Image (spheres, helix red, strand yellow):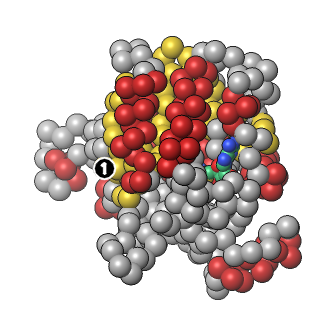
Amino acid sequence: MALKTRKIHQGDCLKLMRKIGDGTVDLVFADPPFNIGYEYDQYDDRQDDEKYLAWCREWIAEVHRVLSPTGTFWLAIGDEYAAELKVAAQREIGFTTRSWVIWYYTFGVNCKNKFSRSHAHLFHFVKDEKQFTFNADDPKIRVPSARALVYGDKRANPKGRLPDDTWILRPQDFQSDQYGFTPEQDTWYFSRVAGTFKERQGFHGCQMPEQLLGRIIRASSDEGDLVFDPFAGSGTTLAVAKKLGREWLGCELSEDYVEYATQRLSEVELNDALDGPADPIASAPSTRNGTTLESRNRRMAANKKQKTLIPDRVD
Ligand SMILES: C[S@@+](CC[C@H](N)C(=O)[O-])C[C@H]1O[C@@H](n2cnc3c(N)ncnc32)[C@H](O)[C@@H]1O
């Protein structure tokens, strides 16, 4: 492993990944640019279709190489390229698909001339179709069954059941801490991390919710395993990996994002609770009291280098 772990490396992930040894990573989570014209500070998110797909094939092949024989690759992607990238990862590069998860999120950005988008795709790929980590019994990824929740049926498994592959994560499923979520920790009602939420770091419009990464990392890795994120952004994957006692490693093109995400990581400790909305009944993520996106960004601009409003990722 020539790339130092517990660090976000600045640069092109394709070049940086070439410095990672074969088979040395246990879990990769990648949330690449979706090629929808989002304004990143450095990356141009308007590539020709074929160029974008060729680039994705290249970095996904590198992900395959660096993963251990029992490694797992989770890919977050939008509608535009989900189909092509699934075919590429599975048929061309050699991954096996375990699940095609739909993450249904609340607080989607309103659209005027079509139905507002409220989902993203999460592909769960493994390198070996038989040997891979999947912690099905971890109580923190299990949810109550309808038998327990709706019907109060005594035959319900007290340990709950594995979630479905559509992650709606309703608040009413989490009124008890026996399934791993207390009101302080969050519900599995994953909203996007919208601009006004307390969880939002303020420098990145594509920040993933920590609770979503919590489920992925708990399910697909063990303590001490190495989790790698080639597109670290605001550092969510790595922050959650650190909180959950995993080794972590990231790449990010933007110097500014690296700086901010590194600061975020320095404030995170092992066993810290994952961020997210506080009230499972209302499932209303906390906003900074009295804070608007504009006033938040004014504050960020004064405090750090942040100068512009950070819009959300929409097509
Ligand atoms: C969708 S965002 C990731 C957001 C992240 N999941 C989070 O929770 O904050 C994609 C990131 O990839 C970065 N990026 C784009 N091209 C890259 C490249 N070739 N190598 C490394 N990072 C890149 C962008 O700067 C952006 O921060």
Query: Relative to the observer, which residue lies in front, 266 or 45?
Result: 45
Q: Position of residue 180 (x, y in %)?
A: 44, 45
Q: Position of residue 257 (x, y in %)?
A: 75, 54
Where is residue 188, by image quadrant?
bottom left
Where is residue 271, by image quadrant?
top right
Query: Relative to the observer, which residue lies in front, 197 or 14?
Result: 14
Placement of 276 over or under 212, stated as above or below: below
What residue sits 40% from the left and 61% below the top? 105
Q: Residues within 10 Å of mark 1 (few under 14, many from 20)?
A: some
Q: Please state which amino acid type lies under the numbered disc 1.
A: Thr
Placement of 229 over or under 150, stated as above or below: above
Camera sees residue 17? yes
SS under mark 1: strand
What residue sits 73% from the left and 40% below the top? 12
Distance from mark 1 CB to nearest ligand 1 atom below 8 Å? no
In this rendering, position of residue 304 left or right of residue 102: right
In this rendering, position of residue 311 left or right of residue 106: right
Tally of numbered tags: 1
What residue sits 56% from the left and 17% below the top? 68
Q: Position of residue 249 (x, y in %)?
A: 70, 34
Placement of 173 over or under 29, stated as above or below: below
Query: Relative to the observer, which residue lies in front, 109 or 181?
Result: 109
Camera sees residue 180? no
Q: Position of residue 41 (x, y in %)?
A: 73, 61
What residue sits 42% from the left and 25% below the top? 92
- What is the quadrant of the N terminus in the image? top right
Residue underneath mark 1: 166
